[in-house]
Amino acid sequence: MHITIDRSHFLTAIQSVQKAISTKTTIPILTGIKLSVTEQGLKMTATDLQIGIETIVQKEQNGETILQIHQLGSIVLTAKYLGEIVRKLPQATVDIEVKQNYLTIIRSGTSEFNLHGLDAEEFPRLPQVTGNQVFSIPSDLLKDMIRQTVYAVSTEEIRPVLTGVVWSLKEGNLKFVATDSHRLASRKVQVEAPEEMQLFNIIVPGKSLLELGRLLSEDDTLVDIVVADNQVLIHMGRTQFYSRLLEGQYPDTTRIIPNTYKTAVQVKTKDLLDAVERAALIAKDNDNNVVRFNIKQMIIDITSNSPDVGKVSETLKPIQVSGEDMIIACNAKYLIEALRVITSPEITVEFTGSMSPILLKPLDNPGYLTLVLPVRIY
Amino acid sequence: MHITIDRSHFLTAIQSVQKAISTKTTIPILTGIKLSVTEQGLKMTATDLQIGIETIVQKEQNGETILQIHQLGSIVLTAKYLGEIVRKLPQATVDIEVKQNYLTIIRSGTSEFNLHGLDAEEFPRLPQVTGNQVFSIPSDLLKDMIRQTVYAVSTEEIRPVLTGVVWSLKEGNLKFVATDSHRLASRKVQVEAPEEMQLFNIIVPGKSLLELGRLLSEDDTLVDIVVADNQVLIHMGRTQFYSRLLEGQYPDTTRIIPNTYKTAVQVKTKDLLDAVERAALIAKDNDNNVVRFNIKQMIIDITSNSPDVGKVSETLKPIQVSGEDMIIACNAKYLIEALRVITSPEITVEFTGSMSPILLKPLDNPGYLTLVLPVRIY
């Protein structure tokens, strides 16, 4: 293998695929990026066996030469060194040549690195995901859906399915749901999908989605999604992202979302977030981060106290209140995380009872819903 | 004590004095900031007993009212909570009122915090540094002197004096020197001082100087420095910084700075830094971070190798070379840290022998000198 490649395009590609590499791996080949040169260009692959990222650097881009191929072939190079070296190389182009025994020469200007590579044949093959179950979604919308649900996944391995976000698709309605059994987040959007296409119980690990979220661009370029038996594949232009799915049956969450409420308040999202964040400064020092809400006529009182530090009281004037007076408490951290991913300026908070879920609904986005369970006040 | 204070001025003051608080302290009163209201304004103090920072918020600034005093008095409040609370308060002004049992009410808009304070009488008094041994130096110059020397202090407590930077002053020449016995940095400047004023063996802890460096502004406002028996006091406008001095005799470093060289090369600082940084990517994986220099005629070869990773070779064309050919090796980390604080575009590197110091001298700044000891090449 022997190529000359534009340094900045090469670095971007390294940084993309590098996201798939686990810093904890003890298997040497998995610390590497596989470079594979064919007539089509340079294919780069990295994986931690849970997720895999593959990208192609083509010979030309917008009429500019990015890659010159002198000899086909492949090699695996340690991602950490490759990334650091390419970032610091002095010239705009890099020459990479594989010699005997996987010794790889990286040249740029007056710099020459000799790195010990590994046999590309030893690199795990990414799964071949095929199937006609394909749907499309704008990149920024998918990024948003991930951001608005993934925070609610469980970090505990007791019920593994809860560490994932469950996807479903029916009649073009794509829905993501996540819950750790203390709170729940749900986002529904309309996507481009074959009319008859249906998906149920597709559980994508939260960790995979965090990495996917970092890869997705902030624009509305369409990405294609293929779901196979135990894999999901996301096509983003020249880059592909694979993730294993979680096995098991995700619990039915529709039952726990109440349809009626006892008290509903309409507030400015930022006012509520600011008030709860201030209350949380004291709450984080007590058990369970508890903040207490007292809704009485047109006033919401938010309080928290810690015997060691002191107490805080916030008075919030809602835009509108309906229903009965209410005293309720919940974990401030859950509320803050739910409020931070809401982009709508106004929300409705629905209280369904002192020991029943608190619902947060953005006024201008009926597809998004988040729910926090209250805690008992002693 | 009862005041109303501008939130942003208050926050700036908190952030200044907070730098003196150790996160590791187990003494409750030292986690606090002392607020003390007199007719002159609000004095705020924090200390970890090694350093102390004191600042005054005056009633007016540029004709604007910053502080209204309703009642004199004093209190100690935990810095961590005070800082976080004031940062998040909703309004432009904050009302602080101390009630019985040191209970302190902080109000802003519809927020009200009740914090348990501590008795200000229990707060350690900062030393009264007096003396006519005063000299002045522009803030940005002092900041620069600190930056260019403090990186070379020792982090090991075996020889405590080496954890400090030694100051001396003679005939208006202020000199800072630091060494950890593997490298040395020395900076000399002309300052405004009484003609007869002399200072010797003033050893300021490196940790104190790091904090002082963060407090110093980037402009040329003059700061006044008073040195007393075991203290140094820096006056920066409304803020004062105290540090204890280290006891003991700093070694005589003048002997180890050679006056002659065998080989001298003149290079662009950035070219040398970039080349050594690249060589260090491989060097950091071998013992002692070793990079090797081979100077032969008009070429400098910089190499490093690690049996596990591979090797690197850099070719640097110097602007000028004089003296004999030279093969020498040193710790890349020391060289990088020395080169990073040099602002001059060109430097002279003087090699005094394969086991004698390597000197780095900025071409346009004769007051600065840094020295790195080589390592033996096997």
Image (spheres, coloured by chain):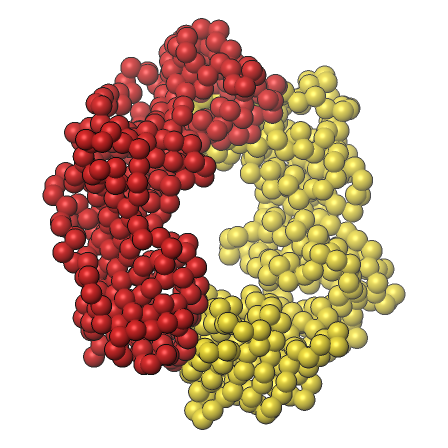
Chain colours: A red, B yellow
Is residue B44 among what the camera can see?
no
> Where, by quadrant of the figure, is residue A88 drawn?
top right
Farthest left residue? A249
* Above or below for A363 versus B57: above
| Residue at x 30% of width, y 50% of height | A367
| Residue at x 51% of width, y 68% of height | B87
> Where, by quadrant of the figure, is residue A207 drawn?
top left
> Where, by quadrant of the figure, is residue A138 drawn?
top left
* Above or below for A36 versus B368: above
Query: In x, y percent, where is residue A185?
Result: 27, 53
Query: In x, y percent, where is residue B354?
Result: 64, 29
Identify which residue, B3 or A62, lies in the foreground.
Answer: A62
- Say left or right for A330 vs B340: left
Is residue B38 among what the camera can see?
yes
Identify which residue, B102 or B266, lies in the foreground.
Answer: B102
- Say left or right for B218 vs A319: right
Query: In x, y percent, where is residue B223?
Result: 75, 66
Total numbered labels placed on residues in the image = 0
| Residue at x 76% of width, y 68% of height | B224
* Quarter of the picture holding the N terminus of chain B: bottom right
* Above or below for B335 versus B37: above
Identify which residue, B323 or B317, lies in the foreground.
Answer: B317
Query: In x, y percent, where is residue A110?
Result: 61, 19
